[in-house]
Image: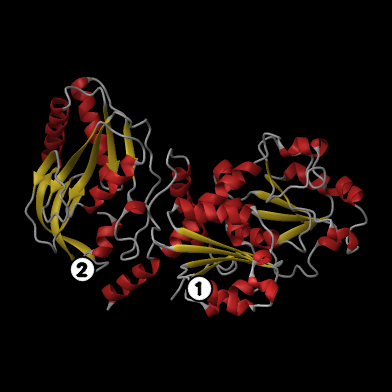
């Protein structure tokens, strides 16, 4: 059976922690004078992006290269998709290059799951619509763990456009699995229509929540939301939910400020707060490569499926 | 014993059953002390020496060797640890999982690296370790210290400092732990 990483949904605490523990090993490789190991020599990792992204694609590409895998980059804008080729055909063509892992980003939720049915390669979800973005959640959990030891009992506030955010969804699942308490802070229009089953509290008042937070996680505010009528104006959003210096002063001294990037300085985060000593935004970027190395190695190199085989031989 | 060996020795994933105690704790202490003297003699002191233990079995032994070197010379050389999992040649063939992050505390250029492992068997772990060390710099020399050399080499690799030479059958398992060294087999 081929192993995939399609979402945090379905991963339990032990699996998430195994991956975060393994990430330490790969973070150390990133600090070496020659940041490269031969672990995935001869393997090919393809990034298949049907939506714009720089940092996630570059992060996966760097992770694959540090493991000595070959990389193949496919971006929808410059492809035969614009000539009308179907998704299925595109995947088949890419797979026929002998690809071992497909890193997929697509504007439609569920696309990576569909692709996983079509191919023998390992599929990694790098963001599907407003559904999930599992490696982002893993790198965020790793970053918080790195600074605060563990997520158990941490109070994490996720602020902004929860409704359209795959990051928020994956993070809620990962952080809660690791024992954190989560408060979503957003206007009603930017919350999902139903929060039944989400292990979260909800607030519309950022100022009230700030003093009790261990982590203030800001989401990117997209300007399209104004034309959609979900917020009246950027100015109003900034005055209610933007993290500026005055608000940051209400955060505890040891709190962390996170943002998945790219940041809209002056909207969800002010320029001074982005460089506040409590901001770990650049750590998130660095850790992103380490976490993705761990994911790629676990799926392609660890032979984890062989462990199960060996155990079943032993049990037979 | 390392989880890797437990999983990979037939009948895979079994339990270690010792049939002979090869060294006891005193024997091991004497062997470590002798190896420490040999390291100092060979390198005319400890000026350039860096001791690096291989995960997992070599790490506690590297600490013990460094303690013994300190006792003799009054200098404790830098001690590091190295996980060679990502350099192994059996990735994709057998389960390979790194145990712990590598920690090389000093620049290895022009140093004399003494690699330490518990058991020398096929030599493939050491091959991987040589590649890994070279990614950290260009040591003046790399030497190898092992508690037990059990033979069955598959590569042209030999140890410089040996606690004990132990003839074994291929299907046997050598377990080096704090209280001594046991020879046994894996059983279901």
Q: Can the viewer see residue A179 in this picture?
A: no
Closest to the observer: A11 or A237? A237
Q: CA distance from mark 1 to mark 2?
A: 36 Å
The subunit carrying tag 2 is B
Residue under label 1, please give it.
A95
Q: Can the viewer see residue A275 in this picture?
A: yes
Identify the secondary structure beneath mark 1. helix
Corner quadrant of residue B41: top left
Q: Position of residue B102 (x, y in %)?
A: 38, 43
Q: Residue at x 37, y 36 (%)?
A: B104
Q: Quadrant of the C terminus of chain B?
A: bottom left
The number of numbered discs placed on residues in the rendered structure image is 2
Corner quadrant of residue A10: bottom right
- Horizontally, is A60 left or right of A155 in the view? left
The subunit carrying tag 1 is A
Q: Are marks 1 and 2 in contact (CB under 8 Å)?
A: no
**Taking A27 as reference, is A71 above or below it?**
below
- Horizontally, is A228 left or right of A40 in the view? right
Do tags 1 and 2 sit on the same chain?
no
Residue under label 2, please give it.
B10
Q: Residue furthest left?
A: B167
Q: Mark 2, residues whose alpha carbon is within 10 Å: few (<14), some, or many (≥20)?
A: some
Q: Quadrant of the N terminus of chain B?
A: bottom left
Corner quadrant of residue B39: top left
């Amino acid at each position: 059976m081929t192993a995939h990483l399609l979402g945090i949904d379905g991963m339990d605490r032990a699996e998430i922690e195994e991956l975060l523990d393994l990430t330490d090993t790969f973070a150390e490789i990133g600090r070496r004078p020659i940041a490269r190991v031969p672990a995935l020599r001869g393997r090919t990792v393809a990034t298949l992006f049907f939506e714009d992204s720089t940092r996630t694609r570059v992060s996966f590409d760097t992770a694959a290269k540090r493991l000595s895998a070959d990389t193949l980059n496919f971006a929808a804008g410059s492809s035969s998709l614009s000539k009308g080729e179907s998704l299925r055909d595109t995947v088949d063509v890419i797979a026929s290059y002998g690809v071992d892992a497909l890193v997929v980003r697509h504007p439609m939720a569920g696309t990576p799951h569909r692709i996983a049915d079509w191919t023998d390669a390992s599929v990694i979800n790098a963001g599907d619509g407003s559904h999930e973005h599992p490696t982002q959640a893993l790198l965020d959990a790793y970053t918080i763990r790195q600074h605060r030891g563990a997520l158990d009992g941490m109070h994490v506030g996720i602020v902004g456009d929860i409704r359209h955010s795959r990051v928020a969804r994956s993070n809620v699942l990962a952080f809660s699995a690791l024992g954190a308490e989560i408060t979503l802070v957003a206007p009603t229009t930017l919350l999902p229509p139903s929060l039944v089953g989400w292990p979260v509290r909800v607030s519309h008042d950022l100022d009230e929540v700030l003093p009790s937070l261990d982590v203030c996680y800001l989401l990117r505010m997209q300007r399209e939301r104004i034309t959609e009528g979900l917020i009246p104006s950027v100015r109003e959003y900034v005055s209610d939910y933007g993290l500026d210096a005055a608000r940051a002063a209400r955060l505890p001294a040891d709190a962390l400020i996170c943002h998945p990037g790219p940041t809209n300085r002056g909207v969800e985060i002010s320029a001074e707060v982005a460089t506040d000593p409590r901001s770990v935004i650049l750590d998130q970027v660095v850790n992103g490569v380490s976490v993705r190395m761990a994911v790629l190695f676990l799926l392609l190199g660890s032979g984890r499926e062989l462990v199960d085989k060996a155990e079943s031989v032993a049990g037979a | 014993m390392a989880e890797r060996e437990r999983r990979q020795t037939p009948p895979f994933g079994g339990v270690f059953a010792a049939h002979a105690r090869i060294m006891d704790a005193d024997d091991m202490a004497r062997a470590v002390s002798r190896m420490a003297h040999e390291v100092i003699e060979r390198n005319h002191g400890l000026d350039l020496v860096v001791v690096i233990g291989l995960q997992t079995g070599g790490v506690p032994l590297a600490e013990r060797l460094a303690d013994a070197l300190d006792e003799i010379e009054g200098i404790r050389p830098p001690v590091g640890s190295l996980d060679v999992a990502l350099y192994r040649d059996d990735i994709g063939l057998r389960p390979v999982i790194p145990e712990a992050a590598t920690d090389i505390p000093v620049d290895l250029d022009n140093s004399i690296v003494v690699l330490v492992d518990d058991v020398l068997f096929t030599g493939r772990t050491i091959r991987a370790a040589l590649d890994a060390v070279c990614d950290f710099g260009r040591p003046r020399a790399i030497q190898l210290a092992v508690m037990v050399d059990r033979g069955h080499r598959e590569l042209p690799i030999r140890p410089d400092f040996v606690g004990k030479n132990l003839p074994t059958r291929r299907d046997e398992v050598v377990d080096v732990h704090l209280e001594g060294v046991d020879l046994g087999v894996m059983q279901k």
